[in-house]
Amino acid sequence: MRPADIAGSVRNVAGSIHVKAIRKGGMYVPKLKLSDFEQKKLVAKTTIKNRMDLKQIRNKEIAKRLNRPENTINYRWQHPETFRLEDLWILVSALGLSDQEILQIVRGKEVSHAEVL
C-alpha cells in the first residue's frame, strides 16, 4: 500500500489506531486496523514528534544533538524501529520525555498514568 492510497485519516481513539479506507483501483475499501508493527511505529513516532512540537525543537537540532546527519534522522522518522538505544537516551534527556511517554515508545501503545505507577 502506498501512502497516496490512504483515503481516510489515521486517528487514535481509546488506544486504537484505524485507517478509514484505502483506495484500490477506483474503489475505496475499508481497512479496519493497522498491523501491530505499524501501530507501534506510529505510536513511537507521534510520541516523540509531539514532544518535539511542545519544546519547539526541529529535526536539525535533534540531528545535531544525536551527532547524526539530518538525512539519517529523516530515515529514522520513517522507520522508528531503527533508532538506537543511545539515540533514545539522548532524546529522553533533550526532550524531557516523561516516564509515561518512554513506556509508550517502548511498548508501542498508549499507556495510562496508572500503568506507570
Image: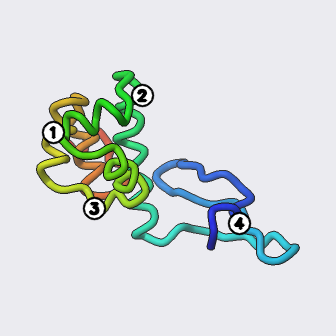
Residue picked out by circle 4: 5
User: 19 or 71, which lies in front?
Assistant: 71
Determine the residue positioned at 50% across, 49% down. 14
Q: Secondary structure at mark 3?
A: helix
Task: Give how far across and how far down residue 52 sits, in percent.
Answer: 36, 31
User: 51 or 16, which lies in front?
Assistant: 51
Mark 3 and mark 1: span between their CA atoms? 15 Å
Determine the residue positioned at 35% across, 32% down. 51
Which sits earlier in the primary sequence, circle 4 or circle 1? 4
Task: Give how far across and how far down residue 91 sits, in percent.
Answer: 21, 38
Q: Is residue 12 visible?
A: yes
Mark 4 and mark 1: span between their CA atoms? 35 Å
Which sits earlier in the primary sequence, circle 3 or circle 4? 4
Mark 3 and mark 2: span between their CA atoms? 21 Å
For residue 82, the mark is: 3
Q: Secondary structure at mark 4?
A: helix
Task: Give how far across and how far down residue 63 sits, in percent.
Answer: 27, 39
In the drawing, does residue 15 fall left or right of residue 87? right
Which sits earlier in the primary sequence, circle 2 or circle 1? 2
In the drawing, does residue 81 fall left or right of residue 31? left
Q: Residues within 10 Å of mark 2 (few under 14, many from 20)?
A: few
User: 8 or 24, which lies in front?
Assistant: 24
For residue 11, the mark is: none
